[in-house]
Image: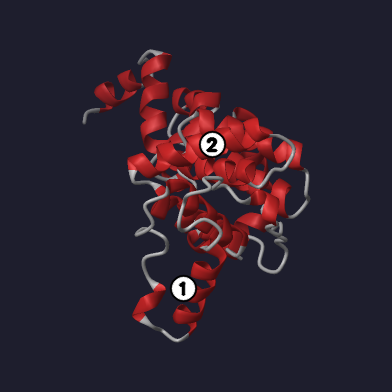
Amino acid sequence: MTIDCFSNIAFLPNDIWVAITIKVASDSIRELCSLRMTCKAARDAGDSDIVHRSVSIPPPHATPWWWCLSPEAKRFFDRCMVAGHPELLFREALRELFIRHNENVGLQMLNSATSTGHVAAKYALSMTLLLRTDGNDEKQKGLELYRELDAAGSLADCKARCFSILTMSWPGEVQMPRIEEQHTVCAAPRCSTRGHMPLLYDYRRRAAERNSVHAFGGAAHIPCIQCRADYDLQAFVNLP
């Protein structure tokens, strides 16, 4: 590339710069930082909210330890939160719900992340609504979200992501709610598996401790989706 051609890049329209920066940001935070150092146009594009909402956030096990000590990193992630980054909203919602016990704030964050299409937030929202006892409408909404995730085949990935966040981000700090009888999702009087999901979960857990093949499968063989939701509630509150 000649010097003249390179100099003309800086005069691209801002919306093109923003589109380029979004693509780079969705690949890597490091690459975004490198791009922003190339010229003023890239730096200005990198300051937009849509770029901060599109940044690729690494999973907890791949996050550099020094980020939590860096004032620059803290300011950057704070800006991403203000811009409404769905992954950060999801993680902060779990912190609000299961460490700080600010249920209303946590639910608001989960709803915001879910509205962007964040499937793990949608799963956490469905479980949190199913755990509520202050109204049947909330439980019905939670079951509806659970049905959608089940139909999309997203449940296994969502469980894994929730497990990763809750166990690796704040080890020893998470306090999950207890499941009481009123939390039971299945209310069908003729359902043959109703009320048996705690026993099935305990059986799978003990099998896992013995490294038995019977640890696998969860409640996938159960035809009643409400009972499968009951099983996943057991698994959810025992994630950490």
- As drawn, which residue projects farthest toward the front? 190
Question: What residue type is disc 2 on?
Answer: Pro
155 vs 234, nearest the viewer: 234
> Taking 43 as reference, is 168 above or below it?
below
Vertical relation: 149 (above or below) 162: above
- Quadrant of the snapshot with the N terminus: top left
Residue 160 percent across, percent down from the top left: 46, 58
Which residue is labeled 2 in the image? 86
**Residue 214 in the figure: left or right of residue 145:** left
Query: Mark 1 against mark 2, which lies toward the viewer?
Result: 1
Q: Nearer the viewer, residue 138 or 90?
A: 138
Mark 2 crowd level (few <14, some 14–19, many ≥20, 10 Å Cα): many
Residue of label 1: 204
Residue 166 appears at what percent x and percent y? 60, 59
* Residue 64 shows up from this direction: no
Q: Residue at x 66, y 62 (%)?
A: 170
Secondary structure beneath label 2: helix
Measured from the top left, where is residue 87 in percent x and y?
A: 53, 42
Please give left or right for residue 16 compared with residue 96 in the image: left
Residue ID at (42%, 64%)? 218
Compute the Cα span from label 1 to label 2. Answer: 33 Å
Position above or below: 238 against 21: below
Q: Nearer the viewer, residue 222 or 41?
A: 222
Q: Is residue 61 above or below residue 135?
A: below
